[in-house]
Image: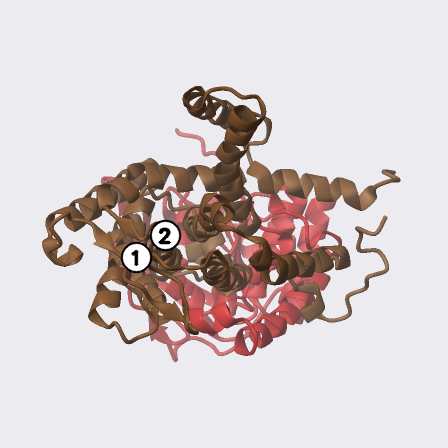
Amino acid sequence: MSAVAEEFITEDGRKIGAVVMEMKNITLKFGGVVAIKDISFDIRQGEIRAIIGPNGAGKSSMLNVISGFYHPQEGEVWYKGARRPTMRPYQVAAQGIARTFQNIALFEGMSVLDNVMTGRLTHMKTNMFQQGLWYGKARAEEIENRQKAEEIIDFLEIQAIRKTPVGRLPYGLKKRVELARALAAEPSILLLDEPMAGMNVEEKEDMSRFILDVNDEFGTTIALIEHDMGVVMDLSDRVVVMDYGKKIGDGTPDEVRNNQNVIDAYLGVAHD
Amino acid sequence: MFYRESGDFKTTYIDDDQTFPIKFDRYRYYAVMFVAFAIIPFMVNDYWVNAIFLPFLIYSIAAIGLNILVGYCGQVSLGTGGFMAVGAYAVYKLMTAFPDVSIVFHIFAAGAITAAVGVLFGLPSLRIKGFYLAVATLAAQFFLVWLFNRVPWFYNYSASGQINAPERTVFGEAVTGPNVNAWAVYLICLVFVTITALIARNLTRGTLGRKWMAIRDMDIAAEIIGVNPLTAKMSAFAVSSFFIGISGALFFAVYLGAAETGEAFGITKSFLILFMIIIGGLGSIFGSFAGAAFLVLLPVFLKVVGADWLGVPTDIVAHFQLVIVGALIILFLVLEPHGLAQLWRVAKEKLRLWPFPH
């Protein structure tokens, strides 16, 4: 680990910190299908790290490996300077990694507030008996966490819908509520799986602003998958490019933009 | 007019989190509690208690229990009858083994024993979902009934195979056995209903309730957000079975007095409780009460109307009762699939705007 520089200056002149998560030679197979092949990359403290690639490149699988949903056959995940043992997703969440999903995965039957409060689960410690009694510890904890949840709700400007059942909300707002739920966990790394899929320009601008604000105000490290190249190049500090499960590029947006392998993967290459 | 939140400002999260945030609702709730505790006990007679109040109260506890499992946590169970039987036989064994201990402790202990059994039979839920889980819990139903029928230790080797509740008192007043007063059995059940409903409400509005609902709505997302599916599902089975166990204990000891498993706690009981929560509304404490009231009161109401008012022979009334109840259930589910609780919610929405709906 010591070989890696402690600091890194991005293209925009932003200073980002040391490596917080490192993927080492990850290989993930489903039967005979190799979804991810021998990929290594790192995520630095406080940066916005984009993972891009054509459809089926293995980007979401990569995120699923990070969040403990898939267990790679080969390779290691290093988190905060230690090798992470094989973990279930809820254990990963307890370590401070939160995520959103490509297809919204909110709890439709619950209100926006309850969804955001669910995001704070990893911070709530009272047991079943204290909660059954309610008065005392459970209520104090509930109020304390409600305060945090309300801060997130304010931050993402969804105050007006806090008591609305999620099922009734339009798509764009659902995406925002999902971000709120992930943020409520106060994660050290936030994984966003296509946060802008299916949004119009205005909604994309809003979401981009929120992502930048989150990174700026809370200092949250963000890893995101996105197809909109304009957004990716604008937002991210560094980019990993994947194609057919392999890493074909890694670096700052400018480096990636001028990488011949990346251009070939996106535009196709002449066979002669 | 008076049923609305405007002007009723909440300035703390504690105020905002209370069970009945609207003032009128709160007063209505106090009024219901007052009538239930201070007026009804003086007016009831044996008929009212045995035909209406006891079954309603006891089934309410079971419905709340099942609603926690099915409505809140999304784990379908058909083992309710079997779990009620566990509560009944547990309380019977405890009553006969420790005659000096108060029956109140026995009933809670029976609930705890049922919770343990519920967790055991809930283990398959970690692997299977939906209809398949329903079939697995059905196995629990048949196994438990078989167990209590075939192992004489459970019914203390009595010749008839039945269990009979000996007389026990609370504060000097008999609540089980043949010499009970109507108001006493009513009150003991009411106390248990109040306690269990409060516990259920507290659990479902807090962290545990959100874990259950998260598992119900999307188990994958729940796990990613930090819900341990094992503890969430097992706690739902435990709490649910605890309530159902208490209900079974009361059903046997206070209501029936004597019971035989296959008859009192058969598969029909499982379906009855399931219908109650479906009609009442899944995922709602109020719905549990509404469903229990509907299925207990409707047959009685039809009997009174048919036999007493219209003078139709009782055997015909008994048959028509089944037909009408069945038809009403179907009608009801077509009109309002989310149950009585949803109907109540819609009514409240309307009432908030009344009389100026714009």
Q: Which mark is residue B329?
A: none
Q: Nearer the viewer, residue B118 or B91?
A: B91
- Looking at the rendered image, the disc whose residue lies closer to the viewer, 2 or 1, is 2
Circle 2/circle 1 CB separation < 8 Å? yes
Q: Circle 2 marks a residue in which chain?
A: B
Q: Circle 1 marks a residue in which chain?
A: B
Label 2 amino acid?
Phe
Q: Quadrant of residue B95?
A: bottom left
> Does residue B1 appear to the left or right of B312 in the view shown?
right
* Residue B298 x/y as whole percent: 52, 34
Label 1 amino acid?
Gly
* Residue B329 x/y as whole percent: 50, 28
Instruction: Supply the letter of whichever chain is red.
Output: A
The residue that label 1 is drawn on is: B87
> Does residue A79 appear to the left or right of A148 in the view shown?
left
For residue B45, say whether it is visible. yes
> Does residue B333 appear to the left or right of B240 in the view shown?
right
Residue at 88% x, 40% y is B356
As displayed, is residue A40 above or below residue B60? below
User: Disc 2 or 1, which lies upstream in sequence?
Assistant: 1
Instruction: Supply the letter of whichever chain is brown.
Output: B
Helix, strand or loop at label 2? It is helix
Tell me the quarter of the image containing the N terminus of chain A: bottom left
The residue that label 2 is drawn on is: B251
As displayed, is residue B317 above or below residue A82? above
Residue at 66% x, 68% y is A216
